[in-house]
Amino acid sequence: MTVDRNDENAGSAEDAEPTEAASVPDSGEEGGTPGEPDTDRAATEPEAADGGPDDVTEIDQSDEQAPGAEGDGESDEVSDAEDPHAPEPAATGPVNSTARRRRRMNRVRAAAGAALSLVAAAAVVGATSVEWPTFGGESASIVVSPNAAPAVASCNGPLLAVGRDATAADEIAVAQQVGATVGTSGEGEPTVEDLAADGVSGDADAQRYELEPTGGEAESLSVATSTEIRADDMSGFMAASCRTAAMESWIVGGSTAVGDTDVLLIANPGGVNATVQLTVFGTQGEAQPAGEPIAIPAMSQVVLPLAGIAGGEEGPVVRVTAEGAPVRAALQSTRVSTLDPVGVDAQDAVTAGESQVFPGVAIAEDAVDADETPASVRLLAREDGEATVTITAQGESRPSSTLSLEVQADVPVQAALDDLEPGRYTVTVSGDVGPLVSAVWQTTGPNGDEDFAWQTPSPAVSDPVTVAVPDGPLARAYLVGDADEATTVTIVGGEVDEEIRLAAGDSAYVTLDADEAYTLASDGGPVHAVVAYRDGGSLAALPVWPDPAAMDDVTVFP
């Protein structure tokens, strides 16, 4: 708050005998502020709400004189010759008389200026002995609610295969189509458009869903797809959520090892062309594949084999950076052990965070009995330091196991989750390495129809969100409460109407009907949630994300 303190002093000197030969300029009114602020007090002024000093009045310390007030203040008895500023005497009387009158008026103005200076000095003395009031307060602001925008979700498209035709080893072809489940929070129906996938054999177009606001209010949109394949060269269950596009995405998963085949999907669901720069992080740190940035035309999807991007990296992490328009990145994977297919998977991109939570991670009994690694964590940090992997059994609040990993900046680390009893666990990855990205790999183990899944982190969800659960075997929602605050979670949809009370850090699960849409809400602290499938040789995990249609209010400062 700015306070103006203006002490106006008016003064004038009028000529009692004006003449036509010469006129005296009007002195007008003169205003000045008495003195300057106490510098010691200014240094200890309380700070304003924005962290800086309170607004203070700027004080003008200039002492102005009326025009022409240049006299020396001596008596009128001083002769013309003694005045250095007096004009030379003229031969005529009237002009000489006018000059004397000017000198008298100059001396009167000088005396008045001196008097005002004494008053100003007295005001300064008084100001230093009296405590001045202070003023402060928060800056003015208004809260604005943005206009509701359409909700947009971009899907991966069908299950793809590389080199399925022995006569065309590099060909990417459609292996099987997917089914979609759509959920909305209102009565609106989304529109569906295709995202063209050039260079892929078969009907490989992905889909883009868009739901317009209703009555000026945004509606929640959730879409998810799934498929199951049992063939000689591919076998497993795949489920994927349809997500929004982003300017930066991270793929934490995949491998170029023998038997693993992965394809990177980059979709541009907008109306503006985009270019993408890929950065691969591997055993030698950060590297960029050869070639120019990749063009992603509007309303299209580009499919790239991971082996052509990540070289010989068996445990890479890929960053996707977009320019021009946001893109949606995902990974599809298939795996063969010897000659037997052992799973298919679709994996979402992740965002970096200080701590990442994975509810409902499966430790399969068949994998443990076969002495195989049932699960592992892959992570990447941008700084050197130590990362911690905390593992907590389902329904427990105390950790079952903790791993400490030395992390080198820009080099992925993968750690096996061994020595755990079969069951479901919450895995938390954190550390002193700044924002990191991570994912958890799981397997059903050798049980005839084997499968695997890469699970990405589940962000904290506070507001109600619509969750589409695609068709699949034994779908469950696994929930983990906030570490510091209890909460009550409700899940409503289909034949399910459940209320679950979670203590701080506690976990639980709810069995769901597949091919249905649900509303998940938390009354209290935030919750981390995942929809997981596990039945025999089928395994998949779909993290629940906050509603992308929900827009926070914006505070505007003038």
Image (cartoon, rainbow, N blue to C red):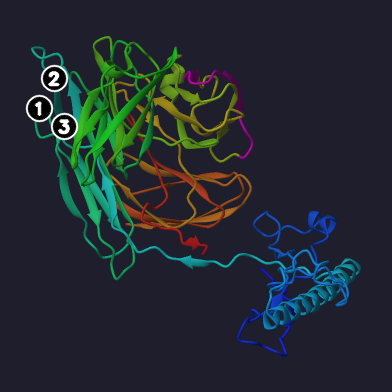
Q: Does 498 appear in magenta?
A: no
Q: Is residue 195 left or right of residue 109?
A: left
Q: Amino acid at mark 3?
A: Gln
Q: Which residue is mark 1?
A: 201
Q: Is residue 540 left or right of residue 374?
A: left
Q: Is residue 354 above or below residue 232?
A: below
Q: Quick one: 379 or 35, which is closer to the camera?
A: 35
Q: Picture coordinates of residue 13 (x, y %)? A: 73, 83
Q: Amino acid at mark 2?
A: Glu
Q: Is residue 54 above or below residue 227?
A: below
Q: Amino acid at mark 1?
A: Ser
Q: Which residue is mark 2?
A: 171
Q: What kind of element bears circle 3?
A: strand
Q: Which residues are magenta?
A: 397-415
How far separated are the C-alphas under marks 1 and 3? 12 Å
Q: Is residue 362 above or below residue 273?
A: above
